[in-house]
């Protein structure tokens, strides 16, 4: 079979162009550092890389969300720590004020400090984050959640911001002010006690405790003194008298319907004391009640006893508020740990994804240089062969 020199020339020209194209592609890869510079280089790999890049970008967003949540939680933790410190100082003042040795001028100084503390609590409750959003307003972030001076009203909602920080992880970046400041059980968390303001004796009721859950009927009781040395106990739920005309001794333990309490002092006929289930109050009302008690100076022994009863209630409510705030601080700390764990998990996954992308996309320089040298050698040989073929003629052999 006879093959013309024209065929050889065309074949070598095609090979030459192919080698040049391959060399140009290698040089482009070396310049960009990427194996794939356009979709046509490897369509299947390009699709996989695109999906992996979307995954990597998503985890970057999760980490940004985590940073945002962490910043807000750290600010909340700082605010709650400040609130707890104010409550500790309020308790110190309550313990000092519940002492007959203090003068009216001392009491007035306590009131001044307590009013300042109340203003501080409102400021902490209106804390804003770096964007100027109110931390404790729930989803109402652009207006102060707590307004007022003596009577503080909550203007936010009961929701909390939930932020996604991982493919299966979400975290609340703050708490509603309603949950933090407005829903705090009074008394000891189970029961609260009080004395009628019209009492004429010097009786003071100690904090009631639930001692028998099985016998407990709700804890809504009234102790009514029929004389200075006898009393009845009425169950307000049923309306029945559960203890009738019982002898009274100051400091005696009184047990009824699963509840135990005591009364000290000398009550008078007609004096009444109440045991009620704990109800929610707010931290601002607790401090305002404290101020109100101090501003009303007792004029006689009965009013002194009433003040002692009210101060005992203030101390119980401050203790409950302090415990409540510390529980919330613990919850915030747990969420901060959760964010940190989520970040570590995200970074680990993102590293694996980015490593996979790099393995598919990044160029192996040593291998690419070897290929380029091979192509250059082949191209040089092809050029020489083409030059020799082009110069061949029968006249050269005559």
Image (spheres, rainbow, N blue to C red):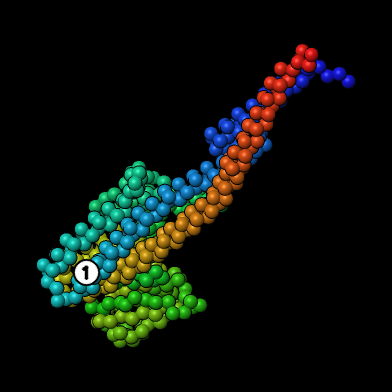
Q: Looking at the image, which residue is at 42% across and 72% down?
A: 219
Q: Name, please, the residue furthest toward the front.
A: 398
Q: Looking at the image, which residue is at 33% across and 81% down?
A: 262
Identify whether 301 is placed above or below 68.
below
**Quadrant of the rendering where the C terminus is positioned:** top right
Q: On the picture, is 215 further left or further right than 179? A: right
Identify whether 81 is placed above or below 302.
above
> How far across and how far down the image is residue 209, in percent?
39, 77
Crowdedness of circle 1 by 10 Å Cα count: few (<14), some, many (20+)?
some
Q: Which residue is mark 1?
A: 93
Say which of 91 and 133 sits in front: 133
Say which of 227 and 257 sits in front: 257
Q: Looking at the image, which residue is at 77% across and 12% down?
A: 395
Q: Name, please, the residue furthest toward the right.
A: 1
Q: Looking at the image, which residue is at 14% across and 71% down?
A: 299
> How far across and how far down the image is residue 49, in percent?
61, 40
Q: On the picture, is 213 further left or further right than 360? A: left
Q: How many marks?
A: 1
Task: Answer whether residue 48 is visible to the viewer in this image.
Answer: yes
């Amino acid at each position: 079979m006879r093959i013309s020199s024209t065929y050889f020339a065309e074949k070598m020209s095609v090979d030459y162009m192919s080698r040049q194209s391959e060399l140009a592609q290698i040089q482009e890869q070396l310049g960009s550092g990427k194996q794939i510079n356009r979709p046509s280089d490897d369509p299947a790999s390009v699709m996989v890389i695109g999906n992996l890049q979307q995954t990597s970008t998503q985890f970057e967003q999760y980490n940004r969300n985590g940073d945002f949540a962490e910043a807000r939680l750290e600010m909340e933790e700082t605010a709650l720590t400040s609130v707890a410190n104010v409550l500790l100082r309020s308790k110190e003042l309550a313990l000092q004020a519940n002492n007959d040795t203090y003068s009216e001028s001392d009491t007035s100084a306590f009131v001044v400090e307590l009013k300042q503390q109340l203003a501080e609590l409102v400021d902490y409750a209106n804390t804003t984050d770096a964007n100027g959003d109110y931390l404790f307003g729930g989803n109402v972030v652009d207006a102060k959640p707590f307004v007022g001076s003596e009577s503080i009203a909550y203007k936010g909602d009961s929701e909390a911001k939930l932020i996604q920080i991982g493919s299966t992880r979400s975290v609340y970046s703050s708490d509603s002010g309603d949950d933090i400041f407005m829903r705090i059980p009074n008394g000891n968390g189970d029961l609260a006690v009080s004395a009628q303001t019209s009492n004429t004796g010097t009786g003071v009721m100690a904090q009631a405790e639930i001692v028998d859950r099985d016998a407990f009927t709700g804890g809504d009781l009234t102790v009514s003194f029929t004389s200075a040395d006898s009393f009845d106990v009425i169950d307000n739920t049923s309306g029945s008298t559960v203890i009738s005309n019982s002898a009274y001794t100051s400091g005696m333990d009184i047990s009824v319907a699963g509840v135990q309490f005591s009364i000290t002092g000398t009550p008078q006929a007609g004096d009444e004391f109440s045991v009620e289930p704990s109800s929610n109050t707010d931290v601002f009302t607790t401090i305002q009640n404290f101020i109100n008690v101090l501003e009303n100076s007792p004029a006689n022994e009965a009013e002194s006893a009433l003040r002692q009863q009210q101060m005992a209630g203030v101390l119980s409510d401050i203790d409950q508020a302090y415990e409540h705030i510390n529980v919330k601080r613990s919850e915030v700390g747990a969420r901060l740990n959760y964010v940190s764990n989520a970040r570590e998990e995200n970074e680990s996954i993102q590293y694996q994804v980015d490593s996979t992308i790099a393995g598919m996309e990044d160029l192996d320089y040593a291998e690419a240089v070897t290929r380029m040298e091979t192509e250059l050698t082949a191209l040089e040989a092809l050029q020489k062969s083409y030059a020799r073929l082009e110069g061949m003629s029968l006249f050269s052999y005559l």
